Image: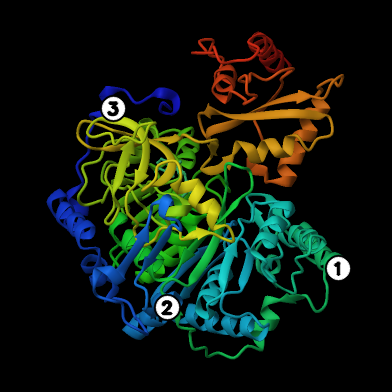
Amino acid sequence: MTTFLYGYVSELTMSDVYSPPDRVVVESHCKGMDEYKKMYDESIKQPHKFWGNIAEQFFWKTPVPDDLSEFMKYNFNVSESPIKIEWMCGAQTNICYNALDRNVEAGLGDKIAFYWVGNDPADKGQITYRELLAEVCKFSNVLVNLGVKKGDRVAIYMPMVTELVVAMLACARIGAVHSIVFGGYSADSLATRILDAGARVLVTADGVYRGTKLIKLLQIATAAMEKAAEQGQEVSHHICVSHLPRLVNPGTEEAMQEHTASIESGWKTGRDNWWHELMRDALPDHTPEWVDSEDPLFMLYTSGSTGKPKGVLHSTAGYMLYTATTFKHSFDHQPETDVYWCTADIGWITGHSYVTYGPLLNSATSVLFEGTPFYPDHRRCWEIISEYKVSKFYTAPTAIRSLMKFGSDQTKPYDLSSLKVLGTVGEPINPEAWQWYHSVVGQGQCSITDTYWQTETGGHIITPLPGATHTKPGSACFPFFGVVPEILDEEGKVIEGEGEGYIVFKQPWPGMMRTVYGDHERFEKTYFSKFPGYYMSGDGAKRDKDGYIWITGRIDDMLNCSGHLMSTAQIESVLVEHSLVAEAAVVPIPHLIKGEALYCFVTMIDGEVYTKEIRDQLKTMIREKIAPFATPDYIQEAPGLPKTRSGKIMRRVLKKIANDETDLGDISTMADSTVVEVLFSKRQEMLDSK
Ligand code: WT7
């Protein structure tokens, strides 16, 4: 079974408990464990009552059913295939209407929806609920005019600008399915996703600065459109936001030249349009398309263990209730006073659920940040928190660990007293980082909420509640409302009480995924086949004597590098595309900042010599075919790989070699154990030459 990252969870830290601070408890929506238990029980035993009450706060064109049999229908048992998850069938609504129109009609039109904070501190803006609605209505008309209809897929490849929120909400408003691709992905990755989704419309921006680096989004998108077209998927309409010219410091000449150059080089009249030109001519009013509860809202790709990314499909009404409710409770959102800031990019699920949908459904005021925590320097977050009086802050363990390097005095010059809740997400947080977050950023006055979830789960599934849970550093604590976790052993036997195993879920919650786009069989196989009757997350977990849940990390062939989930197979398939590489195996190794880093073993084809040039070529291939964030830290030559007699690569052994652990455990099934010694010496060779 997997151990904790770095193996740092001692019995001592497992018994540290932090009570919620009074200043959080007094205003909390759920003030203690008794209240949590009462609400939790209702959510499990009477889901239709629990979620039905919540549904009443939203607008339904056709009301939600009130009996349980219609409210929640599901089959988690593969032997009675198909796997099915349906919530509130028969009801009709529109999530964009609930996020915008409903708030404006309630008198919140002038409330700020987003403070936009640019990469350069000089760039800033803000947009109210009324203004956001007006933009969304116009862009809905733009899409309709281009022939986009309910159910069509729209690909979006954009930086963190308000137009990204406008584009996704406009898709939701007209019933189109958005497929957002993170702006750090390469042209190949974008092309694959355009192809798989069958998207004919693409929304982009000319470019963006990340720190001092200019990311040429339009150039990448143009290449991606070409690649997709070569494979038969023609983008017929591409809409590009002209972002660089409006920056206060557009990085000046280079950016402006880039802006003009990319237009001149690949721009195709007819296909390519400027956002502002289409918006200028668009009509201001738009009536939302009323959609069924189970109509798809969006798809978002996540890594799959076979290497091919999976288009995780989410539907409308359940996702709406779930993101709204998790946002309200996990961050204890106070609509009158809170300023909320989630640092995640909208290109990931965290941005979908907790930058856009969750906050807007709760009429929140948020910071929308284009930049990075390290530009102009590592004080950027503290500056933003004190300037906007952020009260709820949500970021990733990898960011916390990189900031820790700058010492505990860095926050001193800033007034961070507005902070009340500090959230983390993306990977297990080590207790040391948790404690630093609590004492240095939160000054001992905040609740920490370690939210465990996945692209597939739509929203938090195991998480503390800031005013109720007595937290333990490194534990995601207890299930959210509606979520029923179990821990299973390898044979699928339920582990009661203390123990460690696979974390699985027994019944659906409203926000979970419905299928893999275009491949329901893969959905069933990936998540429901190993343990019939359960949704399997792919993560390991431990339950301690007090019932706290500790996520231990992936137990499948996935690795999590700075919160980016990747499959080893996906990296391996790029490595073997090199004409001189015969075979490759990739394993994660612990990394102090990134959590995990990639360690690759490559076997050259017979007679070829592994060189530094080949290593650099392999790194470039990964950057170009996947993304820069997937670049490996180590690539070592492997004249042979440890395999079982049936030819299966023994990754468990490779992991040990990568970590220089000589105790390899049981290797009796290995076909040729002489490779091990060679691998250890090649490892040393690689380190010596670095
Ligand atoms: C995987 C999902 C959920 C949004 C960001 C990542 C790991 C996520 C935690 C946490 C321990 C965590 C899991 C999970 N993970 N949050 N709080 N504690 N592990 O979304 O790319 O779908 O990755 O991230 O391994 O399965 P994702």
Q: Is residue 557 visible?
A: yes
- Of badges 1 and 3, the one in the foreground is 3
Q: Which residue is mark 2?
A: 100
Q: Is mark 3 within 8 Å of ligand 1?
A: no
Locate residue 485: give its quadrant.
top left
Under tag 3, what secondary structure?
helix
Locate residue 162: give its quadrant.
bottom right
| Residue 427, position as x, y percentages in the image | 45, 40
**Which of the marked residues, 2 or 1, is nearer the chain's N terminus?**
2
Identify the disc placed on residue 264. 1
In the rendered structure, are the residues bearing label 3 and label 2 in contact, judged by CB atoms less than 8 Å apart?
Answer: no
Q: Which residue is mark 3?
A: 13
How far apart, in angstroms, are the residues tagged by discs 1 and 3? 59 Å
| Residue at 59% across, 21% down | 654
How far apart, in angstroms, are the residues tagged by discs 3 and 2? 44 Å
| Residue 370, position as x, y percentages in the image | 56, 58
Ligand 1 found in image quarter:
top left
What amino acid does circle 3 point to?
Thr
Q: Is residue 241 visible?
A: no
* Residue 225 vertical position relative to residue 671 in the rendered view, above or below: below
